[in-house]
Image: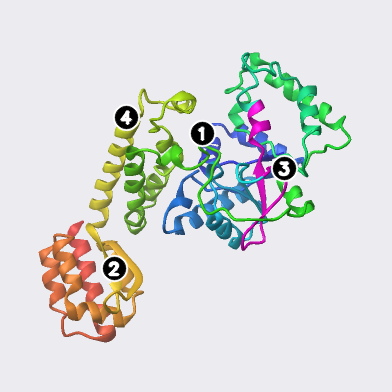
Amino acid sequence: MAYSFSGIFLEQCRRYRPAVLDSFVKLVETGFVELMEQTYYHSLASLYEEKQEFYEQVKMHREIIWDSFGLRPTTFENTELIYNDQIAKMVDAMGYKAIFTEGVIADPNYVYRPKGTDLALLLRNFQLTDDIGFRFSSRNWAEYPLTADKYACWLASTPGRCINIFCDYETFGEHQWEDTGIFEFLRHLPWEIIRHEGLRFATPGEIARDIAPERELTVERYVSWADLERDTSCWLGNALQHACFIYQKRLEAPAKESRDLDLLKIWRTLGLSDHLYYIFTHGGGPGEVHSYFSPYGLPYDASVTYFSVLCDLHYRLKKRTMLADSPFRFATGIDEFTGHVAWSLSGLEDLLEKVDIASLEYHNERGDIAMWARTSLGDDILAEKLESHKESKGEGLRKRLMKTVQEALKRSI
């Protein structure tokens, strides 16, 4: 058995229900339960063009798992099993041994190797998983009622090297209520499984260790376990979702430049995938599932609420950091960008310590920073003071620029 907890869930356990966390700690202490890594905020950070936030959230998750359980997970499970080759390479570079995704890209009952990595790629068997997660209590299902012995027989007759049953935790008691018999099913299932000679239980880490990859897999497009499409349209399938995603993503640099841990936490909390999940507007079965989990009456209500909160955060960041209308990108020549970008006056102060003198001299001679202060920050006083350093060079230029920016920041408080 394996569990994957978001960091934000563990935070809530600590704050509101410590006994819940204690129960999971006791399960892990049995030695039969593996914990998997994911993003701290169950976010879509793996979809950002710049991947630094993804790395930071995985590091944060690694720390809270260690603090809570004293374990270092070796298996990675990205938010909602979102996956492609690029994600696999990032996870491999972070030292993990295995990664999970949805079993739509190959036969899910084998282990694979993502192209260009040393990872074991494990695939969720969604057919056998959904027999429990969605069809278990459906009286219209030809196999109803599903009993433990019947399910164990299905597992035993399934060809392949492994069967990965990967359910949402709320399957047991929420998707399938107690009166459906789901807990009786679970109570008998282990005994029915071990009656079959060819079946045994294993954790993801054990599967990755013991079963050799069948072949190498290339997955260029994003896949996930969400809805019928098994892609990212669950969160980015309409214009409202896309606009909110872009807005939240655009506030990353300002939130980090603010040096305000509370504002950064708010920004990251607004990156939970659930916010975009509630703005899903397609109908049919998937639409019913989205509506079931949403606290809002309509997807439109969810989008208005989410966008309004993002606007409020934007306003707070603008006050806190002197946020610019557009970023300043450092370069050493035409189209010769250094990769350093400032979204605010606070961010500019940080970068003035790091940027090469050649870049500072290039922009100072052209008056670029002064122009940015005037047109994007709307600060004519700062622009005039920056222009007064036109003849400065070397480290003297750096010191004068920093002093001028620091004075402007004090003036803005």
Residue type, label 3? Asn
Label 4 or label 2, whichever comes before in sequence order: 4
**Left or right of 16, for residue 379:** left
Instruction: Give the camera-side residue of 391 and 197.
Output: 197
Q: Residue at x 28, y 37 (%)?
A: 308
The residue indicated by pointer 4 is: 300
Q: Nearer the viewer, mark 3 or mark 4?
A: 3
The residue indicated by pointer 3 is: 109
Please identify the quarter of the rendering in which residue 244 is found.
top left
Instruction: Give the camera-side residue of 239 and 274.
Output: 239
Q: Is there any visible trace of residue 288 in the rendered image?
A: no
Label 3 or label 4, whichever comes before in sequence order: 3
Using the numbered discs, state the Cα–Cα distance from disc 2 to disc 3 in whole angstroms: 48 Å
Label 1 or label 2, whichever comes before in sequence order: 1
Report the number of discs: 4
Residue 130: image location, x then y, percent: 63, 29
Quadrant holding the N terminus: top right
The residue indicated by pointer 2 is: 329
The residue indicated by pointer 1 is: 227
Residue type, label 4? Tyr
From this view, report whether residue 100 is shown above or below residue 256: above
Q: Residue at x 16, y 80 (%)?
A: 389
Residue 165: image location, x then y, percent: 68, 36
**Left or right of 367, for residue 172:** right
Element at label 3: loop
Q: Is there any visible trace of residue 17 in the rendered image?
A: yes
Instruction: Give the camera-side residue of 90 and 70.
Output: 90
Q: Please say which color scheme the image uses.
A: rainbow
Q: In this picture, which residue range is highlighted in magenta?
A: 107-131
Residue type, label 1? Asp
Q: Are marks 2 and 3 in contact (CB under 8 Å)?
A: no
**Left or right of 319, for residue 149:** right
